[in-house]
Amino acid sequence: MVYNRGKLSKKVSIVIRCLNENENLKILLPILFNQTIKDFEIVFVDSGSDDGTLETISYYMSKNNNISLYHINKNEFTFGKSLNIGFTHSEGEIIVSLSAHCFPKNRYWLKNVVESFSNKNIGIVYGCQSPHPETKHSEASVQKTWFSGESKIITEVFLNNGNAAYRNELWKKYKFDEKLTGLEDIAFGKKAKTDGWGIYYCSEADVEHLHRENYKTISNRYRREAEALKVIDEIDKFDSEVIRNTFFYCFRGFLRGVIYDLKTSKETLQPGSDIISILKYRFCQYLGTYRGYKNNMSKNKTTDLYFYPPKS
């Protein structure tokens, strides 16, 4: 390794990708400015908002000298490219990737993220993502499965850029894959782990992740991620078997998901806990996964339709 794993500076950068996140930013930004750590900057990367997002960012920029805004054209957008733009313009030794619809649950969120890097072998930290009260029951089930347990260095490769942080020097070596249609965080984590860096799960760095996706967008998201996963894993022996038997694996996953959601539906206050909503979500989840495994990764010419299909 060639990195300086010395003492951390106080400066932290928070990169937030935006596309029509105005209402969410009105919730998120006051929370960020109420964090116990004050020495941080916010770097926005917007991909064509027209709902008042830019006006809200401009308002906060007029009140704070630690906010900057950059733009990416919709026809050039990928998650990796958008993040690389934000990271390029970040000055912090630690750079946080935070979704605009992920709301830290307390004033110590950023402190918990930064302190997780006190172990010099940790290169990446990702925090807990709890379901927002408005998140569908089945989506909440997925989040609770992915983000659970105590803080620890994980043995597998998993993280999520909705609430994750990286050493700046580590990003400069690898950067995010701009060709992937999703899972750019997993691809980055695999490279870092291969190079000897640890990935740390911090349960105390908890955010509420609000998903307001319709069913078409849910299916699209899982399709993009399945397409990307084939590229990341280079279709090894196991993945080849999965692809050959995609229908079986997706049908089995659909049944397991529905059964689990029905068992837990009476214990939740999440919306969409009725059988129809559960069936719709799990069907869209595994229909998207099936299509992703069967198709090669390719973006539409109209990129925003590929990443964000229309609601109607």
Image: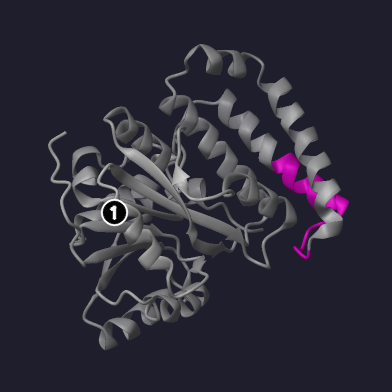
Quarter-of-image position of residue 299:
top left
Residue in front for this viewpoint, 261 or 206: 206
Give above or below for 107 relative to 276: below
Task: Tell me which corner region of the image, top left, top right, bottom left or bottom right, holds residue 279.
Answer: top right
Q: Is residue 309 above or below residue 103?
A: above
Q: Residues within 10 Å of mark 1 (few under 14, many from 20)?
A: few
Task: Check if residue 270 falls in the magenta segment.
Answer: yes
Of residues 17 and 91, the one nearer the viewer is: 91
* Residue displayed at 29% across by 44% down: 123
| Quarter of the image with the C terminus in it | bottom right
Depth check, front residue: 306 or 161:
161
The range drawn in magenta is 269-284
Residue 235 left/right relative to 7:
right
Residue 240's x, y, as percent?
54, 14
Question: x%, y% of residue 271?
Answer: 76, 63
- Name the residue that disc number 1 marks: 118
Amino acid identity at mark 1: Ser
- Whether 107 is drawn above or below 121: the answer is below
* Mark 1: secondary structure: helix
Q: Residue at x 52, y 53 (%)?
A: 308
Q: Could one spot residue 68 in this view of the protein?
A: no
Q: Left or right: where does residue 26 sit relative to residue 270?
A: left
Q: Is residue 278 visible?
A: yes
> Per the image, is 164 magenta?
no
